[in-house]
């Protein structure tokens, strides 16, 4: 009856903005037969995932777990649980994901105050300070690693300014977590979300999140229900961390297996060693690309090691080069998003995709394709 | 640095309300290396998934795909995209999942009209007809297979009554799809959602949905934005079915591999053969349980084959028996939910867990545990 063939995609080299290549042990973990979402052994796996995520986020936050959907749902979880209709939120926008935050703030019925910076540059702390003089937001939100521009956003000064103004500090670490340092407690981040498919090198499907005691208090004092049932942490929390581990929804078991194994491998490598590896391979790629005449979009001190955003050199067609990379070399890199569509390439060196061989494969392929 | 051991859960026999046992080919599919969520090969996999889901739902609906989260998110997707603040919705409640629908309706800012029936019984079409005399809802929602009570809800009369009143008909088929017939077009269902971890026997993590042209028209005429960014079909649609397949969020690649393979196996078996198998094993289990003195909760003509809800016999402790089944036999069955907590067991015979051997294993184990 079926006319569909067994799944058999080509093996690809994933050097785009995510997903990244996944470690064979993580792939293998997903082939583990399932157990129930309320099985004591599964509860133990959830506890392990929470404990390992705390190490990655460098936090003692009790409410640290993985939302049962991809990174954008983690973003929505943070805003929808912290904001109520009528609240104000200051969102720093310097790329696609700041835009997305702004959209979500408005859908929460909150008043959006936008602080824009040019794409490719970080947000200036003094601009945040100035913006806070004329508003009184419940939270200030910013992206740590803008996947659309390759910019690393320094966070410590803005955190200080935010807390001085009495607001919560909400940070997107989708692309940074596991590749550069994310210090939730030291930097006093109140709400943070990430994804599994970037530097953690698990498949997409879960969103690690963590909330400070101050953020939890804000949630507990809500006057209105969270607009999303699926993402309502007043219920989700009871499943992840309640005394009774009450059923909320059926957890994505196999994805949790994958995240468990991926986190185990991250911690086995060690965070410092992992960050050094990401930095080293970024520098190798940068040297190679700059030798070919490529120009990075962000200034060197703000470049992300795991997401290399470069201008497409004059005379080359975006779709043609990326198409040849994919078809002839099985290598995926990312095109530009939003303002950068057709103007930039985004080359990922994330997690298991951050290796010397990945750098060399891509540079060789680009040299062949782009020689005139 | 890591103190966490490699994942190694016991192999369990899954006979609860889901997840069900997953076919080895589906487990193997999840171990396939990832490709990008915008890779032409992945787009082809999405197209195949849509086409196979149409066969399962027996529909020609173009907007038939899988939401990137578990079944409850599918539920929320249907309500959040169809309802706007101020709309009325009639929700039929005869178990936990009707309750959940009601909660979501209110979170959408819509006016909830509840029609309750006793748990363990279906909703009477004449009660729906009567309720519709005093309200004018945008939609009528009902659960086809109440996982909390084991009741199969006949749908055709209620669909007719709903359409006569000019409302859309929204149906939960989380537990029914792939195990009993779900005829979306014949029964004129306008919005339907399901889960992957029941009779489709893939892991939890995706929610198949389908929308009729009338439902799509209602979405297109919305005056307000969908409150959830993640579930907003005006954007999600463009990724699944738009001419340009525009990026919305990073799809859960490995889960899509799993669903692809699971659907392929469902169609290879054939829907009629699969339904007959579910019925046959249900009858075997029923004979065995009734011989032991068990009593089913729903009347025979309304019993679901894949979810056998029985009263816990007098003199037996819920937690103790289920604990021994899990610890000594590695068999998971479900306890009662809500009103039925401590009073009922829910025995799943879903997808790959609907076999003669599953029935025999459980009956043997219960006979040993429950002999006085």
Image: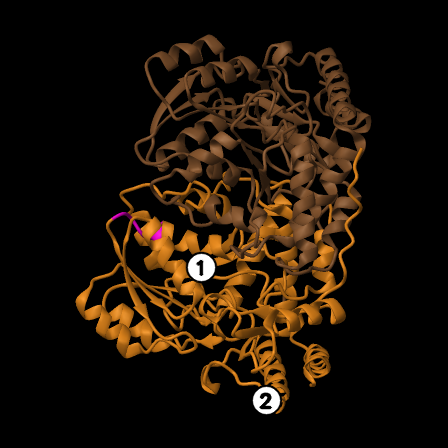
Chain colours: A brown, B orange
Percent position of residue B327, x then y:
73, 67
Residue at (56% x, 53% y) in the render? B47
Report crowding for label 1: few under 14, some 14 to 19, many 20 or more residues within 10 A (C-alpha).
Answer: many
- Does any portion of residue B335 appear in the rendered image? yes
- Residue topped by disc 1: B210
The quadrant holding residue B115 is bottom left
Magenta extent = B81-85
Rendered image: mark on residue B293: 2
User: Any magenta on residue B82?
Assistant: yes
- State the SS at label 2: loop
User: Any magenta on residue B32?
Assistant: no
Percent position of residue B132, x then y:
22, 69
Percent position of residue A328, x then y:
73, 35
Percent position of residue A156, x then y:
56, 15
Most prominent secondary structure in the magenta stretch?
loop
Residue at (68% x, 30% y) in the render? A178
Compared with B45, B297 (above or below) is: below
- Does any portion of residue B267 appear in the rendered image? no
């Amino acid at each position: 009856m079926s006319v569909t063939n067994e799944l058999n995609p080509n093996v690809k080299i994933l050097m785009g903005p995510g997903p990244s290549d996944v470690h064979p042990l993580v792939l293998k973990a997903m082939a583990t037969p399932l157990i129930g979402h309320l099985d004591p052994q599964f509860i133990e796996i959830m506890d392990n995932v929470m404990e390992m995520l705390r190490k990655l986020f460098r936090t003692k936050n009790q409410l640290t777990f993985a939302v049962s959907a991809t990174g954008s749902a983690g973003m929505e979880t943070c805003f929808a649980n912290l904001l109520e209709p009528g609240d104000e939120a200051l969102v720093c926008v310097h790329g696609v994901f700041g835009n997305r935050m702004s959209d979500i703030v408005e859908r929460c019925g909150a008043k959006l105050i936008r602080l824009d910076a040019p794409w490719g540059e970080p947000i200036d702390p003094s601009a945040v300070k100035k913006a806070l003089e004329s508003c009184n937001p419940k939270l200030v939100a910013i992206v740590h690693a803008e996947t659309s521009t390759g910019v690393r956003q320094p966070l410590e000064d803005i955190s200080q300014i935010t807390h001085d103004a009495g607001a919560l500090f909400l940070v997107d670490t989708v692309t940074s977590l596991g590749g550069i340092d994310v210090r939730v407690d030291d930097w006093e981040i109140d709400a943070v979300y990430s994804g599994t498919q970037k530097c953690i090198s698990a498949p997409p499907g879960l969103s690690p999140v963590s909330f400070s005691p101050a953020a939890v208090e804000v949630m507990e004092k809500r006057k209105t229900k969270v607009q999303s049932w699926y993402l309502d942490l007043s219920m989700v929390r009871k499943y992840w961390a309640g005394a009774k581990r009450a059923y909320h929804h059926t957890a994505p078991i196999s994805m949790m297996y994958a995240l468990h194994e991926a986190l185990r491998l991250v911690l086995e490598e060690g965070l410092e060693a992992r960050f050094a590896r990401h930095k080293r391979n970024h520098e190798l790629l940068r040297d190679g690309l700059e030798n070919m005449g490529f120009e990075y979009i962000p200034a060197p001190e703000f470049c992300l090691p795991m997401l290399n955003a470069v201008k497409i050199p004059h005379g080359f067609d975006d779709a043609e080069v990326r198409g040849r990379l994919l078809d002839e070399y099985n290598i995926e890199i990312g095109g530009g998003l939003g303002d950068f569509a057709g103007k930039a390439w985004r080359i990922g060196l994330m997690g298991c995709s951050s290796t010397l061989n990945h750098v060399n494969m891509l540079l060789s392929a680009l040299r062949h394709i782009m020689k005139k």
